[in-house]
Amino acid sequence: MKKVALIGFGAAAIGFLKGMIDNGNIKDYEVDVYEMGRDIENSGFGGLKYDGKLFISKNMGGDLEIPTNIQREIVEFFLEKADMISYENGKKVYKKDIEHGLSFDDEDLFKKFYNEGFEPVKSEFFHIGTDALADTVKKIYQDFEKEENINFHFNSKIEKINKFESHYTINNINKNYDHLILAVGRRGHKLVKSLIAQEPKIVLSNNKVDLGVRFELPDHVVQELNDKMYEFKLRLKTKTGYTVRTFCNNPSGEVTLEKYDDFVTVNGHAKANKKTKNTNFAILVTHSFTQPFNDPIGYGSYISKLSNILSGGEKVILQTYEDFYNSNRTKKVGRVEPTLSDDSYILGDLNLVFPRKTVESIIDFMERLNEVIPGITYPDNLLYGVEAKFYGNKVDNSLFDNLKIIGDSSGWTRSITYAAAHGYLISNTL
């Protein structure tokens, strides 16, 4: 029986294990899953723990071409574990209270954005809710745990990978693995980097990072968008030449911190059963670099750390839109009450953090968005920074039969659906 080391237990790993079971390969392999969280209740699950938005789309979520039927199978797998699908006469039926819909299905709304130069992204979406994710993932884990050939090892931080001619070893574990599957997400970039040092030819590209802000405003300003779509995604090529996009819209949601090893960034989520009066979403500027630069993760980490330095520690900077626009430090907020706890931010000036072109790109995006959604640029709407979305090194998984890097750590995906689907598809290559 061949042995597989699967490092990480997030969306990509879940898709991989589901694929192994569905295609029957699991009977021929012993799979050891190594997760750095100390137990199932305290594991990070990467992007799974933030909000639980699931999409079916050919235009977002990653650079892979994943058939929509595979995407739907993945999405419905999560929804079943979240008890959001019922069965009537043998047919699957979405529960009535599930937040589910189509983005930009309204042609008039689509044209309003399109005519202002935006690229509206169409998709079908489902929202599980942050408060329901822990139980959902626990149910998935319990199902996998019943499989005779799947073994979970929690509290296992993998720091060393050794490559031999025909096998791999990890840390100081006395076990030889025929296959190594890395599913460590964006946070696992250090481990991926150490592996790439041994196999540099696996890297196809490494030149992008998204940096920007988490924007917060009253629900009523974007009520039409929230009611019709829940999640709206837009792209715009701004006057600087940089592309700016929205990401992770959270109606009646909360702004949160996202912690990395040595810095914190800002994020956002929405709960299924606890609502606020504010909507938040990310505004991200894509930064692409050229040779000889090859460390966009280092660059994004540096910018994020700079905001922490200016805020005096593990905090982010909060600024009103008016002050951001005028390059003034914010000294007090106005009508919009922050949903991030006050011990997690300081009032400051994000112009001291971002490069000039990044600031100009965000302002250009916001001013043009205000032409479609009046009120977006109210002076007391809030910006939190830094929000960062790291792209892993884009790798070539075809080079080695016994080494695969899946999900967001592969550089090919950036969503729960695509990461899980990537793992599912890779499972068929063993």
Image: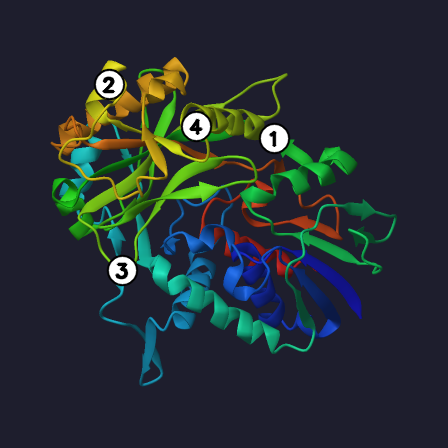
Relative image position of residue 181 (x, y in whole percent): 68, 54
Of 30 and 235, nearer the camera is 30
Whichever of labels 3 and 1 marks the residue nearer the N terminus, that label is: 3
Residue shown at 36% from the left, 83% from the top: 90
Of 212 and 316, nearer the camera is 316
Q: Check whether the beta carbons of the residues at disc 4 and disc 1 lie within 8 A of each other.
A: no
Disc 2 versus disc 3: distance between alpha carbons?
35 Å
Q: Which residue is mark 3?
A: 100
Q: Secondary structure at mark 4?
A: loop
Disc 3 versus disc 1: distance between alpha carbons?
35 Å
Q: Which residue is mark 2?
A: 325
Residue shown at 34% from the left, 73% from the top: 85
Of 200 and 68, nearer the camera is 200
Picture quarter with the N terminus? bottom right
Q: Secondary structure at mark 2?
A: helix
Q: Check whether the beta carbons of the residues at disc 2 and disc 1 lie within 8 A of each other.
A: no
Q: Secondary structure at mark 3?
A: strand
Q: Is residue 207 left or right of residue 308?
A: right
Say what amino acid the circle numbered 2 marks. Answer: Tyr
Q: Which residue is mark 1?
A: 205
Q: Which residue is mark 4?
A: 312
Between disc 2 and disc 3, the foreground one is 2
Residue 386 position (above or below residue 256): above
Residue 21 position (above or below residue 421): below
Disc 4 versus disc 3: distance between alpha carbons?
41 Å
Whichever of labels 2 and 3 marks the residue nearer the N terminus, that label is: 3
Say what amino acid the circle numbered 1 marks. Answer: Ser
Between disc 4 and disc 3, the foreground one is 4
Between disc 2 and disc 1, the foreground one is 2
Whichever of labels 4 and 3 marks the residue nearer the N terminus, that label is: 3
Whichever of labels 2 and 4 marks the residue nearer the N terminus, that label is: 4
